[in-house]
Amino acid sequence: MSTESKEPELMQKIVSLCKRRGFVFQSSEIYGGLKSAYDYGPMGVELKRNLMNEWWTFMVTSREDVVGLESSIIMHSNVWKSSGHLSNFTDPLVDCLVCQERFRADKAPKLAQGEPAPITLGDKGRAKLAEDKVKELLSAAGQEALVKRDGTTVHGALAGDRGYVCPNCGSPLLSAERDFSGMFRTNLGPVDPIKGVIDAVKLAVSEGKSDKELRAVAEEALAGTSVYLRPETAQGMFVQFMNVQQSQAIKVPFGIAQMGKSFRNEITVEHFIFRSCEFEQMEMEFFCPPGEGPKYLEYWKDQRLGWWKSIGLSPEKLTFRKHDEAELAHYSDGTFDVEYEFPWGWDELEGIASRTDYDLNAHMTGSGKKLHYFDPEAIDPATGKTGYRYVPHVVEPAAGATRGVLAVLCNAYNEEIDDKGETRVTLKLHPRLAPYKVAILPLVKKDEQLVERGRAIAQRFFEAGIAARYEDQNTIGKRYARHDEIGTPYCLTIDSQTLEDGTVTIRYRDDRRQERIQVGDAVDVVVAALRTGKL
Ligand code: GAP
């Protein structure tokens, strides 16, 4: 996996640890890798599942008013038409005319109108090529005299009236913005969509249609079999609202939660697993009576911030950011992001949005089906009579699971210089998130009695349902270092004294202190840490 050189040093170290210790690998690595997708290795899959299980327990199984759902990833194209994704789920795409970087205009570095834009060209040959290109483009724009070279930086190109510059080289010399759909389209059914497109386009060409018309013809030929991979899990909850509500006889206010994969054809994939094209979300749609959205928005903000803290993220690295009017999604009348301070700065971890009755109304219009709720005991504000039929409003806490894994890794990563001057890395994970809760390590492999005793102790943990790892390869120091790096909270060392008095050395990951305890107490120590989160 390539460590992105533009990443802060800490990120590079985390990416390297993830590969070295089997948390995250580049997808299809032996074929050169797929830039926007990742595979979770043996340690990563445990960490991600532990995180998602924590979310499920907090959001679903520990409450009476939220139920679960697992809807399909492929959904009817009308779902996305009604939800607004087919028309609104686009990003403004721009090409840099100097370095050819393709990027999102709304995420590009801002520059005030007319402010000089220093363009970083890179080294030697590339810099020369780029400088020639800049001169050519500036000359075409009548700005030739403004070029001034200083090392690999060219000063003086004006930002123009665009208000932003290329995130790669800083150039304000850019293509026009065009809409780019973030939806992944595919075809369902045993048909050959390409044949239909060829036939339709051939006919249109023979009729002398323009390029724009040919595109429309091709789109129409595809439309019959087109389906989309979901870009959010949320719509599954809206379109199954009635089935869930009626099958469970559950009363509003209540929530439907789901975790799973979502897909977005992102223009810019960045910061390792932070923004990828295939990722996992943990979302909940909380349905409430009209007018109660603001109350539940505040309630879920509190709940969600508390949860991120409860799984070990440092409180001072978490904050809320309110969306201003211009930023609000088309369905929302109020949104707050939970932001985490990642190594590159504050960035989004979760969005908590008041979605009003937008989605249920949109699906009622699109499907012609009623998505109402009838409360026989409530007073209808319009008539003053008992019995109130309404379209519920929705508050949605929408968190990233894969992004959550990255936040947890960043928060847990710790480096210390040991007595020998060597750097020791420890992942100080919450015990419930750690892939292994305990490692059982016979001091030496050669002593059969120690091996036998160690295996018997490991068995006790397996029987208690605790993820444990028995290991007798390598020196004890190397084994401790490996378990520090994967975040194992406890190591139990079996030595000759164990055979004499039934005690083991327990080594605590975070401060590496060691003490002797009875073998019989070891399971209880680990169980207590899982309950309290403290080592
Ligand atoms: N249903 C609302 C919704 O999907 P969003 O803010 O677009 O809202 C929710 O996504 C969360 O999903 C984000 O806060 C982020 O954690 C995660 N997420 C979104 N796009 C992502 C991507 N390309 N890669 C990784 N995580 C992503």
Image (cartoon, rainbow, N blue to C red):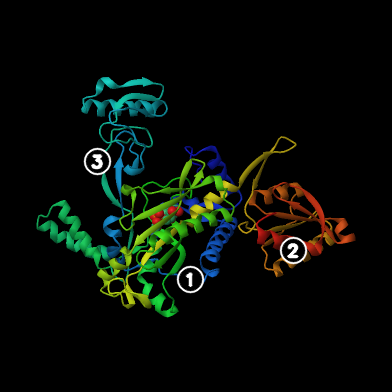
Q: Nearer the viewer, mark 2 or mark 3?
A: 2
Residue extending farthest front: 384
How far is disc 2 from disc 3 in space, using C-alphas?
64 Å
Q: For this rendering, which residue is in front, 340 or 296?
A: 296
User: SS of the residue at dot 2?
Assistant: helix
Q: Which residue is mark 1?
A: 65
Q: Which mark is residue 524?
A: 2
Q: Amino acid at mark 3?
A: Ala
**CB under 8 Å between discs 3 and 1:** no
Residue 395 image point, x, y percent? 40, 62
Q: Is residue 102 left or right of residue 286?
A: left
Q: Which residue is mark 3?
A: 176
Q: Earlier in the sequence, mark 2 or mark 3?
A: 3
Whether residue 151 is situated above or below residue 366 in the rendered picture: above
Residue 100 found in image quarter: top left
How far is disc 3 from disc 1 in space, using C-alphas?
49 Å
Residue 112 image point, x, y percent? 31, 32
The 10 Å Cα crowd at callout 3, few under 14, some 14 to 19, many 20 or more, is few
User: SS of the residue at dot 1?
Assistant: loop
Q: Nearer the viewer, mark 2 or mark 1?
A: 1
Q: Is residue 473 visible?
A: yes
Q: Residue at x 69, y 61 (%)?
A: 468
Q: For this rendering, which residue is in front, 204 or 380?
A: 380
Q: Earlier in the sequence, mark 2 or mark 1?
A: 1
Residue 220 image point, x, y percent? 20, 63
**CB under 8 Å between discs 2 and 3:** no
Q: Which mark is residue 397?
A: none
Residue 356 found in image quarter: bottom left
